[in-house]
Image: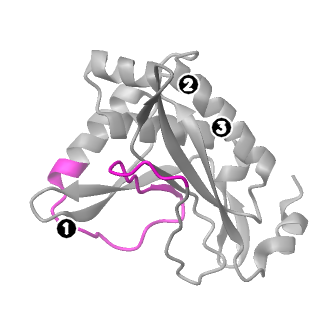
């Protein structure tokens, strides 16, 4: 991909990021995490991050007016404090296996007392699930920073359809790096993992 040329087409757009919502079948995934007693949210964050890390375009960022390609992207997600109904932002390094990630995420979420620990790094995927609503569209706050190329992932409340568990899933990306074809690759890869076609440890 000739990123340096391609990205200039969209970099100076008024809104260079775009958002796509689609549905995923989580029937097999839900059954597995329940059987294994894995945390749903942490497990899904790991799977999405694994799939996105495997697609080069999701690892490009702007850094000091340069284009950089990271070897591996880590994770940052919102985590609800049930007592205050406020959210903490938790940063967790990507791990090699689902079990390792679940352990690291649970430990960090439990031990972190501050709601925010500072600005997010450039080398993260952001997650902000909204499991209380089964939406058909979602929009996000806009910082006005056109070079913010960090992908943002959301999902909503799952529901039953024809005996399957379905839920809405959203990805927001910077058009300088991620085109529709790359969203398509993410969808296909993610659905395959959710179907259990690949080992949970990847």
Pointers 2 and 1 in contact (CB under 8 A)?
no
Residue 163: where, in percent of width, then height?
46, 19
Q: Is residue 177 left or right of residue 126?
A: right
Residue of label 3 = 187
Residue 68 colored in magenta in the image = no
10 sits to left or right of 149: right
Distance (Cα) linking label 2 and label 1: 33 Å
Element type where label 3 sits in the image: helix
- Asked whether, in this view, residue 161 is left or right of residue 12, the answer is left
Q: Secondary structure at mark 1?
A: loop
Q: Please give the label number shown on residue 193.
A: 2
Q: Nearer the viewer, mark 2 or mark 1?
A: 2
What secondary structure is the stretch in magenta mostly built from?
A: loop
- For this orientation, the residue located farthest to the front is 162
Mark 2 residue crowding within 10 angstroms, few (<14) / some (14–19) / many (20+): many
Q: Which quadrant holds residue 105?
A: top left
Callout 3: few (<14), some (14-19), or many (20+) C-alpha neighbours within 10 Å? some
> Is 131 drawn above or below residue 123 in the view shown?
above
Residue located 18% across and 63% down the image? 85
In the depicted structure, whether residue 140 falls above or below residue 57: below
Q: Which residue is disc 1 drawn over?
A: 114
- Tag in front: 3 or 1: 3
N-terminal of the pair, mark 3 or mark 1, is: 1
Q: Calculate the distance from the C-alpha at mark 3 to the C-alpha at mark 2.
A: 10 Å
Task: Using residue 80 as the reference point, say whether residue 135 is left or right of it.
Answer: right
Q: Residue at x 80, y 45 (%)?
A: 181
**C-alpha gap between disc 3 and disc 1:** 34 Å
Q: Which residue extends farthest left?
A: 83
Figure check: 118 above or below 179 = below
Residue bounds of the magenta highlight? 109-136
- Residue 170 x %, y %: 56, 51
Tag shown at residue 167: none
């Amino acid at each position: 991909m000739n990123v340096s040329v391609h990205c200039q087409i969209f970099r100076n757009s008024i809104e260079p990021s775009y958002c796509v919502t689609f549905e995923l079948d989580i029937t097999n995934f839900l059954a597995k995490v329940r059987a294994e007693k894995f945390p749903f949210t942490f497990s899904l964050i790991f799977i999405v991050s694994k799939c996105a890390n495997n697609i080069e375009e999701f690892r490009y960022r702007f850094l000091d007016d340069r284009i950089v390609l990271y070897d591996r992207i880590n994770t940052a997600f919102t985590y609800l404090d049930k007592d205050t109904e406020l959210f903490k932002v938790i940063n967790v390094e990507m791990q090699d296996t689902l079990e390792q990630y679940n352990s690291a995420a649970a430990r960090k979420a439990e031990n972190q007392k501050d709601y925010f620990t500072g600005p997010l790094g450039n080398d993260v995927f952001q997650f902000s699930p909204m499991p209380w609503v089964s939406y058909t569209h979602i929009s996000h706050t806009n910082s006005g920073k056109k070079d913010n190329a960090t992908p943002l992932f959301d999902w909503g409340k799952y529901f039953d359809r024809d005996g399957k568990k379905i839920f809405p899933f959203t990805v927001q990306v910077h058009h300088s790096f991620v085109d529709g074809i790359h969203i398509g690759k993410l969808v296909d890869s993610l659905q395959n993992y959710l179907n259990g076609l690949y080992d949970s440890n990847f």
